[in-house]
Image (cartoon, rainbow, N blue to C red):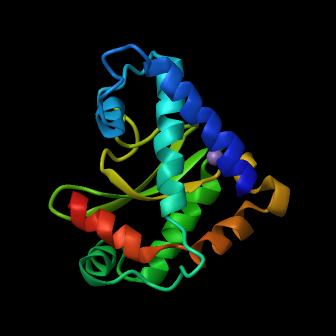
């Protein structure tokens, strides 16, 4: 995780700063940059996504995490997936079956409906035409750099470990802010 944060995330952040320095994007929010992404601009797409995605990834976890969501988010999960267990299975399946490098997301739409999707590389559901188009409130990195040092090819074990660390109070907060 230290290498992931200090090398990988740092690399995306530095390259995003370089790609936006001196342009009209320099003072825009990262959400604005992603929503208005020129998908043919590979440097901005890969590093803008990489910056945002990893920020959400770190905030998705806590050493005291795990357990269950609560309140309106738990209601929305039960409405969409019938139970927390079936949500967990569907999210894990989405993360396990993303071919190659990418991310699995839990997103919220205006009004509060939640939906799962996944995306390739450093793409993000805020970008035009990517995933379910909702606001991502929980994100899991399934690039090999995220798990190979500890889990080798056992991506499902890494996904299972992630569920023991999910910071549901932060996911609840993002749900309330973006629903
Ligand atoms: Mn990563």
Name the side, left or right, on which 23 lies relative to 147: left
Quadrant of res 137? bottom left
In the rendered image, is residue 161 in sight? yes
- Residue in the picture at 26% in, 80% down: 75
In percent of width and height, residue 8 lies at 67, 41
Let me know if residue 152 appears in the view: no
Query: Looking at this view, is 22 or 103 the one in front?
Result: 22
Quarter of the view holding residue 28: top left
Q: Would you say 120 lies left or right of 73 here?
A: right
In the rendered image, the vertical position of residue 18 relative to residue 96, given as above or below: above
Name the residue located 31 percent from the left edge and 63 percent from the top edge.
174
Closer-to-camera residue (119/139)? 139
Q: Position of residue 173 (x, y in %)?
A: 31, 69
Could you say where residue 99 lies in the image, as x and y percent from the top left? 64, 44
In the picture, measured across the screen, residue 134 lies left or right of residue 59, that is: left
Task: Please tell me which residue is depicted at 30% across the width and 16% down the height of the picture.
Answer: 24
Res. 101 image quadrant: top right
Residue 20 lies, in percent from the top left, at: 43, 20
Counting the numbered discs, the total is 0
Q: Which quadrant would the N terminus be assigned to in this image?
A: bottom right
């Amino acid at each position: 995780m230290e290498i992931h944060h200090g090398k990988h995330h740092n690399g995306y952040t530095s390259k995003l700063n370089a790609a936006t320095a001196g342009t009209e994007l320099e003072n825009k929010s990262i959400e604005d940059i992603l929503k208005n992404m020129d998908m043919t601009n590979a440097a901005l797409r890969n590093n803008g996504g990489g910056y945002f995605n990893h920020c959400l990834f770190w905030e998705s976890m806590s050493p005291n995490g795990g357990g269950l969501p609560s309140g309106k988010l738990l209601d929305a999960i039960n409405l969409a997936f019938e139970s927390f267990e079936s949500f967990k299975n569907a999210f894990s399946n989405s993360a396990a079956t993303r071919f190659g490098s990418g991310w699995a997301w839990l997103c919220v739409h205006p009004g509060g409906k939640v939906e799962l999707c996944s995306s390739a590389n450093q793409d993000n559901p805020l970008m035009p035409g990517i995933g379910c188009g909702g606001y991502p409130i929980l994100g899991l990195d399934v690039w090999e750099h995220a798990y190979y040092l500890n889990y080798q090819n056992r991506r499902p074990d890494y996904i299972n470990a992630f569920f023991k660390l999910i910071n549901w109070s932060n996911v609840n907060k993002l749900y309330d802010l973006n629903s």
